[in-house]
Image (cartoon, coloured by chain):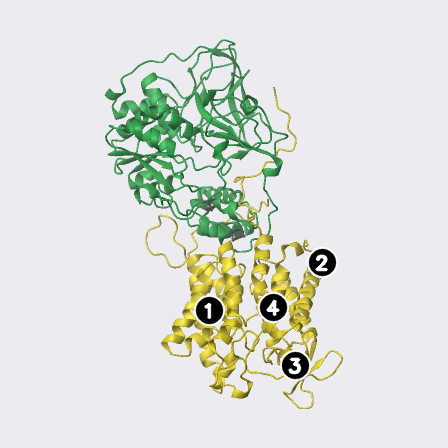
Amino acid sequence: MSGKATYKTFKGGIHPPYNKELASGKAIQAAPLPREVFIPLQQHIGAPNEPLVGPGDRVELGQKIGSNEAFVSAPVHSPVAGTVKEIADVAGFTEAKVKCVVITPDAEQPGFAKQNRDVTALSDEDIRSIAREAGLVGMGGAAFPTHVKLTPPKDKPVDTVIINACECEPFLTCDHRVMLERPHDLVQGLKLLVRAVNAKKGVIGIEANKMDAVDAVRDAAKGEGGIEVEILEVKYPEGAEKMLIYALTGRKVPPGKLPSEVGCLVQNVGTAVALFEAAAWGKPLYERVLTVTGPGIKEPGNLLARIGTPISVLIEACGGFVGSPGKVIMGGPMTGWAQPDTKAPIVKGTSGIVVLTPETVDVGTEEECVRCGKCVDVCPMFLMPNFIVQSVKKGQWDRAEMWGALDCFECGCCSFTCPAYIPHVDYVRRAKTEIAALKRR
Amino acid sequence: MMIVAEKMLVTVSPHLHKKDETIERAMKDVLIALTPAAVWALVVFGFNVVYILAVSCITAALSEVIMRKLLKRKATLRDYSAMVTAVLFAFLLPPTTPLWVVAIGAFLAVGIGKELFGGLGKNPFNPAIFGRLLLWFSPLAVYTTKFVEPFFWKTSGFFTPIATSINEGAVGRVVYKTMAGNPVDIATAATPLSLLKSGKWLPDMVAGPTPVGATWVTSGGKPSFWSLFLGAKSGCIGEVCILALIIGGAYLLWRGTIDWRIPAGIIGTLFLLTLVTWYHPVYNLFSGGLFLGAFFMATDWVTSPVSKRGKWIFAVGIGATVFILRFWSLRPEGVALAIFFWNIGTLVIDRYIAVPRFGEVGNKVFNQLPALPEPAPEPAKKRA
Ligand code: SF4
Ligand code: SF4
């Protein structure tokens, strides 16, 4: 890392092996049509949707099939034209079962009938309702409904909209490809975001390992007032909301607070492009670009896949496994979920599928903490991961909170660097559950 | 269409781990870093050093295996931590320590200092220092406080194992013999720090060229700078060659195994305090166990604070304590004792010294427990 120009960044963090070259040169391809799609009714943080269709119903491409009146929710749409087979509980990408609308697609699929709307005339209110109707959520993983983020508290005006284009997770390249192939749509999407919250400017933060994307987006933004492209140091988790805001603006979001506290709004590349598609074309979020990659995949690539496609279909589309897989991860390797099989359907927040071979899986055995302090050094939130673990082991929940369990955003830097192979995130999740339960009493 | 896959591993994120970041690797690093000092000890004090190291290592390994069996814990010998403790413990001894004393000390260090306290990670004290101090405050202390001239092997023979007996004939008298019982002619010599403490420098007679060219003492009877720095001096096995310790320390810093704040804080503090009081600043730095302690003992992961802030407090505390002990106490040396005190201090620092979170406003100095409702009568104790 030495000898290179220094770019903006945050304190702490790690330098995992990135392995982006596996898929970064592969153009986005359309994924094959699965025999069945499984659309989870809840793909966002918030209230779960109620199904709007029942078994035997006919659905069209882009038709709304699940919604909820609650403000913090996002509807889901059918990614295919076909027939509803059933509403069933299916194993999702986390351990929990999720309620899905199972649809059998027609053999012949129509293309999406694009409308051609003038987006310049839209008001902030229009943009918010478009985002909601299109079912937009954060597509980087957290899947928070976009329209909620676009409604900051009245007393906390947003002046800067930030596009998280870091893609700091190792292996993943989907945002990189989208920036290369659709830079104009990204810039238009950002302009809509800026308008939705009446911000002063939009900033696109890109890590220095994607200089071609920097050029592409800078080109696209030429002549657009109030849009900046910033280069950031290659470090994980550069794309974490609070780290990114700090790196770009020097503002620090206080613990437990939202970015609007410091006048910022962060959105993902995919979400910005999806907002443009929704506003200009009337297209709801029913498909997304994701990366299928890793040493365990024969032909790594970037696919445009329909939401609800089982991951087995996508793995086959990329040539299948190399040998037998060691670990199949939904999402990036730092925060993603290991899968017991390949049945789970992808959701709006799925940015990739990473397959490790048995040789590249490094789990180790959990040892006693040797108090080396490495986890403390790398924690970007400046927490005490080792003491959180110690407190959880003893069931001392007040101490776990004192050491910062509630402020942990589960980036995994601590475990990555822990010589004792302690799975801190596991303990942190337990602490969060227990502390929440105590606070409810 | 379903892909059948056996053995897909499901664990919690993250799914990547830093290459070569293991306890074992770190311990091996420390052993590698201690090698230059060990080699130099061999040159200065002869092959007796190897006998001492061997006895220390074998006893440490046996102590760990036996204690873990007795305490019904899983074997951990492969993490090399017992070896690190054994070498560091041996480094803290005079080069003529009787082997049976070495064995007792190594057991105290690993068997008691580490395993009885709960094993690696739970021991509150640096095990090597714990073993050394127990010896120091025991009736065996006399065996571990008599120092000999550098290059004494020129008279006794390089490979001759030395058997020391104390109080033979008269109280306080030291007699050096070969294992076969033949007396050998070895002169005891005060360490540079006890020379400083007593204010009486060496008689000119012992001055003379050493095999490395530097002289042990200058004409005034004061150990020369180069003899102090390169290690042609009387002292404990591992502490004599400052250069070798710096090389080893630099390796550990480069490998990221130790944190620079600790050696910098300790050495810097002692230097500043001796400078302000004009108490032989340079002489003080390069005498005694300061570098060995600062680079290899105080940096022990388990017994030093985990936060950067804590590490600074810890390091400055040790530096100041060493100064106080050297300046005011009767003992010439105080590094081991100072580290021991601050091993206890570590528990307090870690618990109470606050590290402000990202974005936290205000200058919080001390940690405070948040008020949570009392846990349910059955505290939920789910184990992984
Ligand atoms: S404690 Fe949480 S925020 Fe800190 S490094 Fe670990 S996972 Fe990341
Ligand atoms: S990195 Fe692991 S071993 Fe080191 S202090 Fe943190 S939890 Fe303990």
**Who's the residue at 43% across and 13% down the image?**
A61
Q: How many marks?
A: 4
Disc 1 to disc 3, how far (Cα)? 39 Å
User: Quick one: SS at disc 3?
Assistant: helix
Please tell me if label 1 and label 4 are on a single chain.
Answer: yes
The amino acid at mark 3 is: Thr
Host chain of mark 2: B
Mark with earlier residue (3, 2):
2
Q: Which residue is mark 3?
A: B155
Residue A135 drawn at (x, y percent): 39, 23
Host chain of mark 4: B
Does the beta carbon of the residue at mark 2 sit less than 8 Å from ligand 2? Answer: no
Disc 1 to disc 4, how far (Cα)? 19 Å
Disc 3 to disc 4, how far (Cα)? 27 Å
The amino acid at mark 1 is: Ile
Say whether residue A61 is left or right of residue A329: left
For disc 4, the neighbor class at 10 Å (few under 14, some 14 to 19, many from 20) is: many
